[in-house]
Image: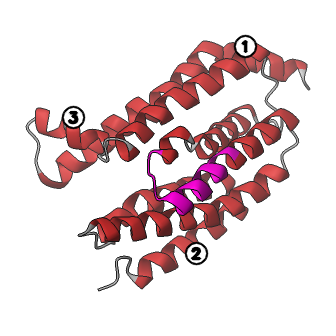
Amino acid sequence: MSVVPWYITIVRLLVPASILRWSLWGLLASTVVDMYDWKFVHVVTDQDMMVYQSWDKAMDLYYWLFVLWIVWLWKDSWARKVAVGLFSYRLVGMVLYWLTQWRFLLFIFPNVFENFVIWCLVLFLLTKKEKLFLTHLQKITMLILLIIPKLIHEYFQHFLTRQPWELYDVGNWMGLEGIVQEYVNYFAWGGLLYIVPLAGFLLLYGKNITKQNEKGN
């Protein structure tokens, strides 16, 4: 039996095309597919895991090419340069991983690129502008709030080789079972690592960003 069923590869090849039409929603859909493909693979041995990790990183690189296309069209030069830089940094880590199969490299070279693009697309959507008009402090804060949670998640995945909810099962603590427990864990940890930092950034700088965008008109 193949480690990765053929139909999962087909799905991961098709979904990213939506990024070209619906940038934010297509990227979010690709992220969800990336997260859920694990449920359909057949990993039994360490060798299976190596095959899956290499396939998964190849699929990531494939859909990031769609993301890079829309990033290249951004009018905000700072956001464009940072996104390309983060992509390049992660790509170095992925190449080194393919050469060595040392998973800890994926922690050293975290995937901040994807979340940075999502944050920028959210800000573009909320402000209805093609530029961010962020101050230097806002830019630094944004990157810190992106990098730290991602490092925490990468540490769980590639150093402890566990998902956070496998070690800290929020759903189980609440007395839940089955699919409800599973989704509570997804939302709890996803919210803590990704939604809360974004919401915090918007609360801290929302008014300032609005004022700066008004000045930018």
Give the mark toward the camera: 2 or 1.
1
Which three-letter amino acid code belongs to the residue tagged 1?
Answer: Leu
Instruction: Say if 217 sits above or below 68 in the image.
Output: above
Secondary structure under badge 2? helix
Residue at (69% x, 34% y) in the render? 123
- Decide whether the magenta segment is chiefly helix, strand or loop: helix
Name the residue nearer the viewer: 96 or 68: 96
Classify the position of the N terminus by image quarter: bottom left
On the image, the x and y values in percent for residue 23 come to 68, 55
Farthest left residue?
175
The boundaries of the magenta stretch are 89-104
Farthest front residue?
100
Give the mark toward the camera: 3 or 2.
3
Badge 3 or badge 2: first in the primary sequence: 2
How packed mark 1 is, by other alpha carbons closer than 10 Å (few <14, some 14-19, many 20 or more), is few
Name the residue nearer the viewer: 61 or 170: 61
On the image, the x and y values in percent for residue 71 come to 78, 50
Please check the rendered image and state whether residue 103 is part of the magenta-colored stretch, yes or no: yes
Q: Are marks 3 and 2 in contact (CB under 8 Å)?
A: no
Q: Quadrant of residue 3?
A: bottom left
Answer with left or right where residue 212 lies relative to residue 43: right
Q: Are marks 3 and 1 in contact (CB under 8 Å)?
A: no
Secondary structure under badge 3? loop
Which three-letter amino acid code belongs to the residue tagged 3?
Answer: Tyr
* Residue 137: mark in rendering: 1
Which three-letter amino acid code belongs to the residue tagged 2?
Answer: Leu
Per the model, the C-alpha gap separating discs 2 and 1 is 39 Å
Secondary structure under badge 1? helix
Which residue is label 2 attached to?
14
Please check the rendered image and state whether residue 123 is part of the magenta-colored stretch, yes or no: no
Instruction: Say if 128 sits above or below 27 in the image.
Output: above
Classify the position of the C terminus by image quarter: top right
